[in-house]
Image (cartoon, rainbow, N blue to C red):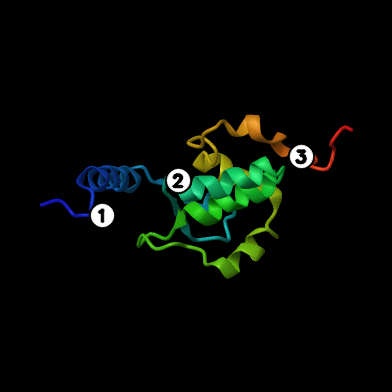
Amino acid sequence: MAQSYHKDQTISALIGKFKERISEEVTYVDLSEIDSDLDEMWCFHPATGTQADAIIKKVSDGNYFAAQVEAIFQRCYDQNGKKRFRPADKEGLLKLDPEFVASISERIGAFDDLAPDVDELGNSSSGTPKQKPSSSSVKD
């Protein structure tokens, strides 16, 4: 019998299919290919809806680098299937070399599965936040 993820059978089946897909669609990044001093393999699964929302939020706020870091933070697992990073690690990830982060981001297709299209939300790598309409600009 299939594992139950939710009391609604249809939702449970759909969750099961998604879990199956993310366990099969793993992108491996051998850090020694980026830096010969690093001997570690990072595994990246597709983003869940909640993870995608966190990444898209950073892009829509104009924080493209932070969005790349968020993608790495959210989607990275060790070879045993456990999340690689803890919340306390996020500050350290934000201090990494932007070229390193961009390289990992590109390798894992950090924004490939996200909808709406990330390019429509932010200003790519400019880091310039989009102007938000002011609620106080009411005409008399």
| Pointer 1 residue | 5
Q: Nearer the viewer, residue 135 or 131?
A: 135
Q: Which label was assigned to residue 103?
A: none
Quadrant (top left, top right, bottom left, bottom right) of the C terminus? top right
| Foreground residue among 131 and 139 | 139
Horizontal arrangement in the rendering, residue 133 relative to residue 48 (left or right):
right
Q: Position of residue 94 (x, y in %)?
A: 67, 58
Q: Looking at the image, which residue is at 54% across and 32% down?
A: 116
Res. 132 mark: 3
Three-letter amino acid code at the position of disc 1? Tyr
Lateral position of residue 20 relative to residue 69, left or right: left
Q: Earlier in the sequence, mark 2 or mark 1?
A: 1
Q: Nearer the viewer, mark 1 or mark 3?
A: 3
Above/below status of 105 relative to 42 = above
Farthest residue to the right: give it.
Answer: 140
Q: Are marks 1 and 3 in contact (CB under 8 Å)?
A: no
Q: CA distance from mark 2 to mark 1?
A: 16 Å
Mark 1–mark 3 distance (CA, rounded to whole Å)? 39 Å
Q: Are marks 3 and 2 in contact (CB under 8 Å)?
A: no
Relative to 60, does residue 95 appear above or below in the rendering?
A: below
Question: What is the quadrant of residue 97 in the picture?
Answer: bottom right
User: In front of the other: label 3 or label 2?
Assistant: 3
Q: Looking at the picture, how far across and down is residue 3, in whole percent?
A: 18, 54
Task: Give the labeled residue for mark 2.
Answer: 49
Farthest left residue? 1
Q: CA distance from mark 3 to mark 2?
A: 25 Å
